[in-house]
Image (tube, grey):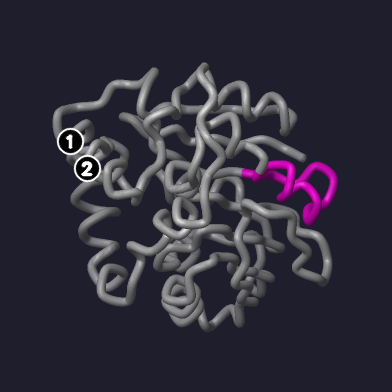
């Protein structure tokens, strides 16, 4: 796989600048219902089951969106510890308000740099629809798994979903939307393929698994 230039601060900002209060107001319908069903061919319900299968009662969620899945998933305890991490204030505010009943922690931090959130280590980490928004190719952006391992318990589960560009079937709508979003910097997944994701997980996590649903890779592994 050809190397790509190191991402600039503008590249990093472009990946989350799309998520404003206005866009988040329609995110669940536009992304999690319309595009998930018609373009990605992976309904939100399938991603929700992925959360149910892997989430712990001591959870860090990175790239939080609207908090849709945290609001609907089944935690193994009635009083989970949930930390929300995102460089975008609008996402943090939207998600934290949605799951206010859990009194979530909020951290305005980028996963692309080493971080320390303080407090106990986490038993699970969710990265849902995060990787395809990070700049770089799949092999370079996989450094996020190393950063996450520094704040997790031994054997913690790391899971998520990401849109792949190659190595999966993409229908016309998926190809069109991905091209547009890559051109505008909303996505950065033109160099993300199944082989690269398999490599990234095997290098950084143990017991890695990937399930392809449409052009979405549902992945998991342990630290």
Q: How crowded is mark 2: few (under 14 residues within 10 Å), some or many (20 or more)?
A: few
Residue 74: percent from left, percent from top = 53, 59
Pointer 2 and pointer 1: residues touching (CB < 8 Å)? yes
Front position among marks 2 and 1: 2
Q: In this view, does 199 lie to the left or right of 26?
A: right
Relative depth, front residue between 215 and 57: 215
Residue on which disc 1 sits: 176
Q: In this view, does 191 lie to the left or right of 21?
A: right
Identify whether 194 is placed above or below 83.
above
Residue appearing at x 43%, y 28% in the figure? 191
Residue appearing at x 44%, y 24% in the figure? 193
Residue appearing at x 24%, y 36% in the figure? 179
Q: How many marks?
A: 2
Residue on which disc 2 sits: 180
Q: Give the range drawn in magenta.
A: 144-158
Identify whether 51 is placed above or below 218.
below
Identify whether 58 is placed above or below 35.
below
Q: In this view, does 9 lie to the left or right of 23?
A: right
Residue 175: percent from left, percent from top = 22, 31
Residue 207: percent from left, percent from top = 71, 27
């Amino acid at each position: 796989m050809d190397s790509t230039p190191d991402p600039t601060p503008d590249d990093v900002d472009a990946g989350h600048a799309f998520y404003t209060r206005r866009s988040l107001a329609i995110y669940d319908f536009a992304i999690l219902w319309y595009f998930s069903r018609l373009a990605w061919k992976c309904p939100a319900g399938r991603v929700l089951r992925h959360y149910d299968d892997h989430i712990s009662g001591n959870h860090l969620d990175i790239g939080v969106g609207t908090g849709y899945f945290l609001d609907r998933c089944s935690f193994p305890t009635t009083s989970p510890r949930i930390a929300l991490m995102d460089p975008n204030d609008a996402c943090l505010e939207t998600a934290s308000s949605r799951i206010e009943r859990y009194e979530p922690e909020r951290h305005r931090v980028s996963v692309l740099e080493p971080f320390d959130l303080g407090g106990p280590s986490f038993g699970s980490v969710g990265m849902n629809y995060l990787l395809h928004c990070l700049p770089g190719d799949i092999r370079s952006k996989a450094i996020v798994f190393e950063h996450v391992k520094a704040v997790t318990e031994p054997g913690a589960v790391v899971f998520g979903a990401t849109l792949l560009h190659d190595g999966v079937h993409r229908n016309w709508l998926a190809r069109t939307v991905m091209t547009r979003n890559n051109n505008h910097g909303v996505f950065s997944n033109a160099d993300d393929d199944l082989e690269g994701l398999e490599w990234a997980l095997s290098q950084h996590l143990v017991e890695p698994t990937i399930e392809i649903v449409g052009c979405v890779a549902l992945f998991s592994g342990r630290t």
